[in-house]
Image: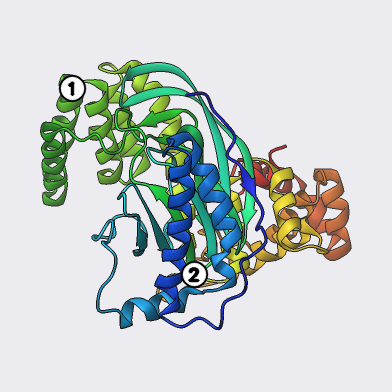
Amino acid sequence: MSAVAAPRLARGPALARAPEPTPATVPAFFTALGARIEAAWEAKGRDAAAFPAIAAAMLAEAAPAEHFDLMDIVSWVHSADELPSQADIESKFSEPPVTLFLSKSKLFHISALHWIDSTTSIHQHSFSGAFHVLHGSSIHGNYTFAEKHRFGPHLMTGELTLKHVELLRRGDTRAILSGDGLIHSLFHLDRPSVTIVVRTVKDLPAKPQLDYAPPGLAFDPYHKPNVAVRSVQLLRLLHRMGHAELVPRAVALVARSNASTAYLVIDEMFRCLRAADRFTTFLEACRAHHPELVEILVPVYAQRRREYKIIGRREKVHAPQHRFLLALLMNVSRRSEVLRLVAERYPGERPAALVAMWVRELAATRLPGESGSVLGLELGDAELAVFEQLLAGLDVAAIGARLREEFDPADVDAALPGIDELCAAFRRSLLFRPLFTE
């Protein structure tokens, strides 16, 4: 399927405003919405290609965010004697999902997905429909993937490109296209964020639902052959035992496996070998057996390590503006895009000054039981002053001139070589790199 841009729908005219919500109105509202969607889809002969537009238009028109909030759904569930048949009852996706409506045809359902700290992978879908922000906000990234090498139906390499990034707010609605019609990710900014999703059960039974990893890996996270899964689980056992044969056995498994299974083994070892140097040594030992795969996995895991660090920091940070900054640093690759999104969320403010202030606040934030700052970096007044001037676009000479206005000129002159090195370190920083990439 060729890549097609998913329709971007602003909130349309709402239905007549309902009375103040009560738990009883939640099922009535979504049952009525589901019935309208089902009737419109039946009029199109249940054509799978027509469903996203129908779902997005009707969801935007109904505007659930104008009628309900998080606690209305909680109150309904807690007072209900019976619920619609619940998809994903084990809450493997969302924290938790609540099915609000199941169509008579059993071909689509409406659910509320709740998120606290989870972040979606970059992924496509084997289903279609639409989603609507009921509560909170998110950074939404849209991508394209140009395949270069296929190891099989479940693993391939290529070029993953961020096509568009936007800030989604309460009331926004977007269509979901199946396959590579929509490759996207969501980084939820608020605790919680709640999304209403109208989706088919499945559109593409013969095709995998792929996840993507920058800079260019596509894989099927649901393809888990029995032998591969048990082999990986036993590696995990050896790791928990501290067994000396963990790495040799993992390398031997990679050597005898196809590329898809080799990737599962390598991915497990990334979690087992937390020290970067140990994992790098292991990965290089695998290169002789799967050179093309390892070549792309080196930058994939460098980026994944960076993402894990940012996600780990986000779990410790609850202020919306700080979570917003971490979301931008993780999902946006260029300074201009970072500043555009800051300006969009905080109109009338100076974006670079806001970012500098947030970094200063995070650098001063200490968590109970931890000695360092929540950033994982120790930045004093002098380092932060250099950071702010570098973020403002000044070169080393201009930074030195500004610092002489605040600090002793002789000390600044003596420190200029170190300032040059500090600026280079900020530009290379895994955390701050997007702020200094044009």
Residue at the disc numbered 1: 257
Residue at 85% x, 44% y: name it.
Answer: 397
Say which element carries label 1.
loop
Which residue is at the front of the view, 60 or 122? 60
Residue 363 appears anywhere in the view: no
Task: Find residue 60 and report its horizontal and vertical position in percent.
Answer: 59, 57
User: Percent from the top left, x then y, of residue 30?
Assistant: 44, 65
Residue that mark 2 sits on? 191
Q: Nearer the viewer, residue 434 or 249?
A: 434
Identify residue type, mark 2.
Arg
In the picture shown, does residue 131 fall above or below 295? Answer: below
Position in image of residue 418 (x %, y %): 70, 47
Q: Quadrant of the C terminus?
A: top right
Q: Is residue 281 visible?
A: yes
Q: Nearer the viewer, residue 54 or 237?
A: 54
392 relative to 369, above or below:
above
Give left or right: position of 96 versus 164: left
